[in-house]
Amino acid sequence: MVHTRNQLRERVDHHLERFENGTFFDNDEQYLPFFYEERVTVADWAGEALFVVDEPIRFKEALAGYEADIRETYATLLEAAMVLPSQADLYMDAAEVAESVGRRQTVAMSLLARAADGSGDRLDGILPAASDNIVAQTKQAEILRDASTILVHEIKNYRKGSTE
């Protein structure tokens, strides 16, 4: 274990030397928590962009799975003294990412029916409620292939507000 810690120390010293020389290297993002107090997501950089979330429940599940993978990986690397303890803080948890997206204009589309109490209208438990979020229940698109007449019929019905 001492040998591994020494290897980590040597690697970090080498990285610090590269930083001092202004040289970039693979995985230099692992040091971001040491340079920036606040973590940001793509949503934070997107300003007033409209976010479209396809299948919000799957979005939440994917975030949770990714978070679990990261935590497990960093626990293993930390135990082997291959990373510094604060490096795992580079990643936001699923709730923080959902919060960041949920603070923006969001359209959520889902084939899944909403709950009988209407709780799905505000993306409850998936994305935080924001006044300008919209939830749209969608239907499975028909496979049209070479049937252009069906496409024309679907467009006309859509324009009339009909869902025949």
Image (spheres, rainbow, N blue to C red):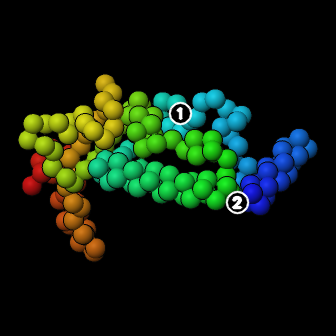
Q: Nearer the viewer, residue 143 or 137?
A: 137
* Amino acid type shown at disc 2: Met
Please tell me the numbered disc located at residue 1: 2
Residue 94: image x %, image y %? 42, 44
Residue depicted at 55% across the width and 44% down the height: 91
Please state the horizontal and vertical placement of residue 39, each as a whole percent of the image.
Answer: 58, 35
Find disc 1 in the rendering and name its residue: 44
Residue closest to the far right: 21
3D distance between C-alphas at marks 2 and 1: 40 Å
Q: Is residue 6 above or below residue 105?
A: below
* Residue 70 visible in image: no
Which amino acid is tagged 1? Asp
Res 10 visible? yes
On the image, which quarter does residue 58 sit in?
Answer: bottom left
Could you say where residue 144 lies in the image, as x and y percent from the top left?
A: 25, 69
Where residue 138 appears, x then y in whole percent? 22, 51
Residue at 60% over, 56% down = 79
Find numbered disc 2 in the image and state the secondary structure of the residue it sits on: loop
